[in-house]
Amino acid sequence: DLRFPELYRRGVAKGANLFPIIASWPVNRINHWDALLKARAIENQAVVVGVNRIGNDPKLSYPGHSQIIDHHGKVLSINEGDETCISAKVSIESLLAWRDAFGALEDIKK
């Protein structure tokens, strides 16, 4: 669940470099979705692929906003509401170099 950062910390501690996140975030909380995806990428120095539902149910509307975010929090690709596929080129070398240069993950208490 995107709202619980400790889940992603466990993953990165075990060597994860990319987190796929599948969700149904409604339109009235889409700003939270956007902010939390970026936060998970930045704080874990990892790539995040957020896939959000599009459509409606009897109570809520789902706007998409699927996106690929790099380890700096930069949105590389985003879906703004149509059913489609998105893609982006990511570099594991760049990610690992950033982790070496900015060793924030080394400060995690074990």
Image: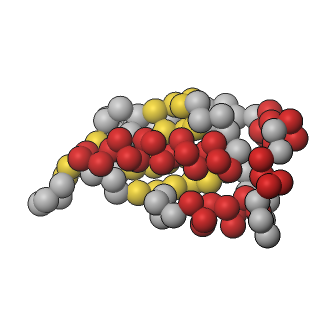
* Residue shown at 30% from the left, 48% from the top: 29
Q: Position of residue 71 (x, y in %)?
A: 67, 39
Query: In screen coordinates, is 27 left or right of 96?
Result: left
* Residue shown at 81% from the left, 39% from the top: 102
Query: In screen coordinates, is 61 left or right of 105?
Result: left
Can residue 47 be seen here? The reply is: no
Q: Is residue 80 above or below residue 7?
A: above
* Residue shown at 35% from the left, 32% from the top: 80
Q: Position of residue 60 (x, y in %)?
A: 18, 55
Query: In screen coordinates, is 24 left or right of 5?
Result: left
How many marks overall?
0
Q: Position of residue 59 (x, y in %)?
A: 13, 59
Q: Position of residue 49 (x, y in %)?
A: 55, 46
Give the colouring mode of the picture: secondary structure
Q: Is residue 57 above or below residue 67?
A: below
Can residue 7 be seen here? The reply is: yes
Q: Is residue 71 above or below residue 11?
A: above
